[in-house]
Image (cartoon, rainbow, N blue to C red):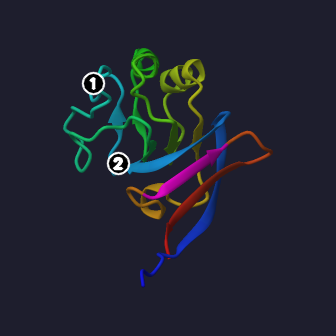
Amino acid sequence: MIAKANARTREIEGRSIVRGKASGPALVSQAPISFLGDLDITTGRIVGKVPGVEGRNLKGTVLVLPDSMGSAGAWRFLYQLFVHGNHPVAIVSQIMPDPSLIQGAILANIPIVCEASEDVVQAIKDGEHVEVDTEGPRAVIRVTGPA
């Protein structure tokens, strides 16, 4: 007999920055990521020296990070990730991302949630299934993980 793994879903509230719905596995970075320099837009791979996530691919993930490192050109890199099909499906940032990254997310229809009710970098584990819903009256991050 094969035992089924139990999963539990928990909700974290946050502030909606870019509206939308998306879900995927969490890619959790303990450090900020610069969209201008830390990412290869043609592959979606993190090429910058970002501890714990260097060499990983963010394609199809819900990117969870404490902050983004600002750059006036960040929007172009996020949008180019989208054009190449290598973008994260959503971004969850503990604090407000830089305005250029928000601009890129608007162009690429990538939902962003920030200022969550919990420290998302600690509350969400790498690989957990995350659903971001910013279309309702409040932004909700649903996390499904092991019981």
In which quadrant is the N terminus drawn?
Answer: bottom left
Is residue 3 found left or right of 9 in the rendered image? left
Residue at position x 42%, y 23% from top? 85
Compared with 4, 9 (above or below) is above
Residue at position x 27%, y 24% from top? 40
Compared with 58, 2 (above or below) is below
Compared with 124, 39 (above or below) is above
User: What is the x, y in percent for residue 129?
Assistant: 50, 55
Is residue 122 found left or right of 31 in the rendered image? right
Residue 126 occupies which quadrant of the picture? bottom left
Between residues 3 and 115, which one lies in front from this camera angle?
Answer: 3
Between residues 68 and 124, which one lies in front from this camera angle?
Answer: 124
Q: Which mark is residue 29?
A: 2
Q: CA distance from mark 1 to mark 2?
A: 16 Å
User: What is the x, y in percent for residue 147?
Assistant: 50, 77
Element type where label 2 sits in the image: loop
Q: Earlier in the sequence, mark 1 or mark 2?
A: 2
Q: Which mark is residue 40?
A: 1
Residues at marks 1 and 2 touching, judged by CB atoms closer than 8 Å: no
Residue 43 occupies which quadrant of the picture? top left
Q: Residues within 10 Å of mark 1 (few under 14, many from 20)?
A: some
- Amino acid type indicated by mark 2: Ser
Element type where label 1 sits in the image: loop
Is residue 17 found left or right of 24 in the rendered image? right
